[in-house]
Image (cartoon, rainbow, N blue to C red):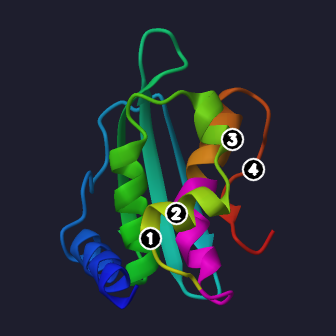
Amino acid sequence: MAMGSDMYRQQILDHYKNPRNYGELEDPTFSHIGENPMCGDEIRMDVILADDDETIEQVAFSGDGCAISQASASMLSASLPGTTIGELLEMDRDDIVDMLGVEISAMRIKCAVLAEKVAQDGAEIYRGELDVEKTTTED
């Protein structure tokens, strides 16, 4: 078990040090920002949808934060293309913990789910189902 856990810790560090899809997309379908005030994490998620207005075609993120928040955003940005907005909205914290591959303490779970919540809120704002300026994990 420890060997597998070490492998996932290395994966988290790799995504933190070498983030995938880091930056901002030119002309995204929607973009949204969120923060975790307890840790100081801030993430912006940019999403481009395919012509069907449902399938996620491209994702990028930017921002600053702890290793867990940044690795989670990197992993999420790599896994979302090809999925639908509906599938994104069905994701929950267990999906993120499974993606990270390690147990996340109660103090760090808000760091881990920040990117997911920002992407979900951005999608709901785009669909006209939510009206918030910035997502926060304190809600």
Kindly indicate the quadrant of the structure image that contains residue 87.
Answer: top right
Is the C-beta separation of discs 2 and 4 under 8 Å? no
Look at discs 2 and 4 and give the one toward the viewer. 2
| Residues shaded magenta | 105-117
Q: Tag count in the figure?
A: 4
The reply to whether the magenta stretch includes residue 9 is no
Disc 1 or 4, which lies upstream in sequence?
Answer: 1
In the rendered image, the quadrant that contains the N terminus is bottom left
Question: Upstream in the sequence, badge 2 or badge 4?
Answer: 2
Between the C-alphas of marks 2 and 3, the distance is 15 Å
Residue 101's disc is 1
What secondary structure is marked by label 3? helix
What amino acid is at disc 4? Val
Measure how far apart labels 3 and 1 are at the Cα level. 19 Å
* Place of residue 29 in the rendered image (x, y in percent of width and height, measured from the top left): 47, 28
CB atoms of marks 2 and 1 within 8 Å: yes
Which is more N-terminal, label 3 or label 4? 3
User: What label does residue 31 carry, if any?
Assistant: none
